[in-house]
Image (cartoon, rainbow, N blue to C red):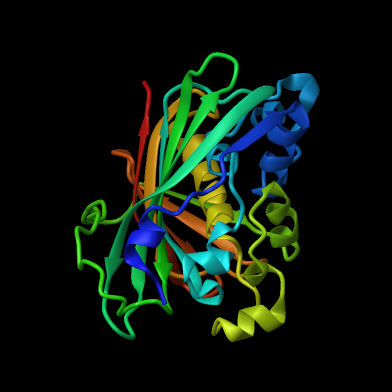
């Protein structure tokens, strides 16, 4: 059972991480960059002799404290944890090398009621260890499916981005690989839900699901290609809601409006997996 005050003030370990160009390249490969060997625009992200450029969504794994919700002291039913929403603000281009510090904290808890789960809001600030400069701020909404009814507040709830009416103006299909979750977890997101069939079954899924943040990376790739011309400094803000899981091997179709709104669906099942998305790019 969740203790509201204890979880709200739970001390998440500060993470110091030394980044290398290899880390930047591995992250890009883990979200599907490089699958088109004839697209030279992707080379700076996957070949160190061309960069490396850092995919802006790497902010979600830099300074990542790991699956801290699995600590029994949190009171969270970790098997039933699902990533609900993600927000990223880039204050400066992410470095390909150097030491960074990730400081994560719980910023809010919403009790949806007995049998209805709970929402956990958290925020991570990434700073340059040498200068103290703030590089990025990420925010997450985690859906605690097994933890409602602990007597916490029913709000406030962060509202989703509005979606435009009418058809999207740009459509991008990007494939995922059957083994992609095994690669992606090496970024530090080691929830066994994504690789262990037994754990996935206990969580109510027929097979392991792709990390939500890997799906975010694939969608970010599509957005950078169409709205940012693959410029790593172009993306300033991104936020989205995860509406359904992706299974490794499925094709993610990102549907984009030129005002920065977007959603994504898996082609094979025609199911919306990302909704209420919005991205802000520099001119």
In the figure, 194 relative to 275: above or below? below
Observer-nearest residue: 68 or 28?
68
Residue at (71% x, 20% y) in the render: 51
In the figure, 73 relative to 93: above or below? below
In the figure, 282 relative to 280: above or below? above
Residue 206: tell me if it is visible.
Answer: no
In the figure, 140 relative to 273: above or below? above
Observer-nearest residue: 177 or 195?
195
Q: Position of residue 267 (x, y in %)?
A: 52, 67
Q: Position of residue 229 (x, y in %)?
A: 51, 28
Q: Position of residue 266 (x, y in %)?
A: 51, 66
Residue at (51% x, 51% y) in the render: 216
Q: Quadrant of residue 241?
A: bottom left
Q: Position of residue 176 (x, y in %)?
A: 65, 59
Q: Quadrant of the N terminus?
A: bottom left
Q: On the rendered structure, is 127 left or right of 278?
A: right
Q: On the rendered structure, is 105 left or right of 200?
A: left
Q: On the rendered structure, is 197 left or right of 9?
A: right
Residue at (64% x, 48% y) in the render: 31
Residue 108: tell me if it is visible.
Answer: yes
Exactly how many numbered labels are in the figure?
0
Q: Residue furthest top?
A: 131
Observer-nearest residue: 140 or 101?
101
Residue at (69% x, 26% y) in the render: 44
Q: Quadrant of the C terminus?
A: top left
């Amino acid at each position: 059972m969740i203790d509201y005050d204890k979880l709200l003030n739970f001390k998440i370990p500060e993470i110091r991480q030394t980044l290398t160009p290899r880390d930047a390249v591995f992250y890009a490969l883990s979200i599907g960059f490089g699958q088109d060997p004839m697209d030279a625009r992707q080379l700076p992200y996957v070949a160190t002799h061309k960069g490396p450029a850092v995919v802006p969504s790497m902010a979600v794994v830099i300074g990542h404290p790991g699956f801290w919700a699995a600590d029994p002291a949190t009171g969270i039913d970790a098997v039933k944890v699902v990533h609900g929403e993600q927000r990223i603000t880039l204050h400066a281009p992410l470095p390909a090398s150097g030491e960074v510090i990730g400081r994560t904290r719980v910023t809010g808890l919403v009790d949806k009621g007995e049998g209805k789960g709970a929402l956990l809001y958290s925020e991570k600030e990434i700073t340059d260890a040498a200068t103290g400069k703030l590089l990025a701020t990420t925010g997450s909404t985690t859906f605690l499916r097994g933890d409602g009814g602990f007597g916490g507040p029913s709000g406030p709830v962060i509202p989703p981005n509005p979606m435009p009416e009418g058809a999207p103006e740009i459509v991008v299909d990007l494939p995922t690989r059957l083994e992609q979750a095994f690669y992606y977890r090496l970024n530090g997101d080691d929830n066994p839900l994504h690789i262990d069939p037994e754990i996935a079954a206990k969580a109510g899924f027929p097979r392991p699901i792709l990390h939500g943040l890997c799906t975010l990376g694939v969608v970010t790739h599509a957005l950078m290609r169409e709205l940012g011309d693959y410029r790593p400094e172009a993306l300033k803000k991104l936020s989205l809601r995860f509406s359904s899981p992706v299974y490794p091997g499925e094709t993610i179709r990102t549907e984009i409006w030129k005002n920065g709104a977007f959603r994504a669906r898996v082609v094979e099942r025609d199911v919306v997996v990302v909704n209420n998305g919005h991205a802000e790019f520099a001119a």
